[in-house]
Image (tube, rainbow, N blue to C red):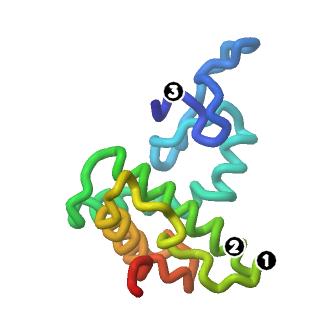
Amino acid sequence: CRGRRCSWCFCPPRDANTGKIISRCARCKLDHYCSRTCQEIAWKTDHKAECARRAELERGLMTAGLQGHGAVLDALLAARCVRKSTSNTYESGNPSCGTLADLEPMDGHPDDLEKIAQTLAEIPGMLPDGSNAGKAFDA
């Protein structure tokens, strides 16, 4: 479904009123946007951290034995959850926030989530400093 909807607001590729075709990120050519506004919001919140690192993420996931577009999307979602959780750590005062252990195992595949966590932790700038996401399951 990627490319068929805006990567930020998920609207369809054409505006019913203007017939405008959705545009894509000029840098990675993977994320698509329906407007400049959506592109700017996405850049500030998530895409800036992900765009330049996506190829490195794909290589890291393949090395970990996780292949395909679905694995990349899972990793990007996990990274976004950690970034959001980490930003809420300071607001909530809960130091345990900001790890992938906060997420439910994916369809009973905790090994895949641990591989994703380790891969994300190895890519500088993909996760906030001090998130400990790579150690999500160390007890």
Near mark 1 (Cα within 10 A), the count class, few <14, some 14-19 or many ≥20, is few
Q: Where on the picture, by quarter, is residue 138?
A: bottom left
Mark 3–mark 1 contact, CB under 8 Å? no
The span from disc 3 to disc 1 (Cα, nearest Å) is: 36 Å
Residue 56 at least partly seen: no
The span from disc 2 to disc 1 (Cα, nearest Å) is: 7 Å
Residue type at mark 2 is: Ser
111 or 48: which is nearer to us? 111
64 or 16: which is nearer to us? 64
Give whichever of discs 3 and 1 has the lower sequence position: 3
Disc assigned to residue 4? 3
Depth check, mark 2 against mark 1: the one in front is 1
Q: Position of residue 61 (x, y in %)?
A: 29, 61
Q: Which residue is mark 1?
A: 91
Mark 3–mark 2 contact, CB under 8 Å? no
- Horizontal arrangement in the rendering, residue 23 relative to residue 107 (left or right): right
Q: Where on the picture, by quarter, is residue 33?
A: top right
Question: Measured along the vertical axis of the image, is residue 134 above or below residue 80?
Answer: below
Quadrant holding the C terminus: bottom left
Question: Measured along the vertical axis of the image, is residue 85 above or below residue 80?
Answer: below
Secondary structure beneath dot 3 equals loop
Q: Position of residue 137 (x, y in %)?
A: 40, 78
Mark 2–mark 1 contact, CB under 8 Å? yes
Secondary structure beneath dot 2 equals helix
Question: Measured along the vertical axis of the image, is residue 69 above or below residue 138?
Answer: above
Question: Measured along the vertical axis of the image, is residue 130 above or below residue 7?
Answer: below
Residue type at mark 3 is: Arg
Q: Which residue is located at x 26 percent, y 57 percent? A: 66
Q: Which residue is mark 2?
A: 87
110 or 128: which is nearer to us? 110
Q: Which residue is located at x 58 percent, y 75 percent? A: 98
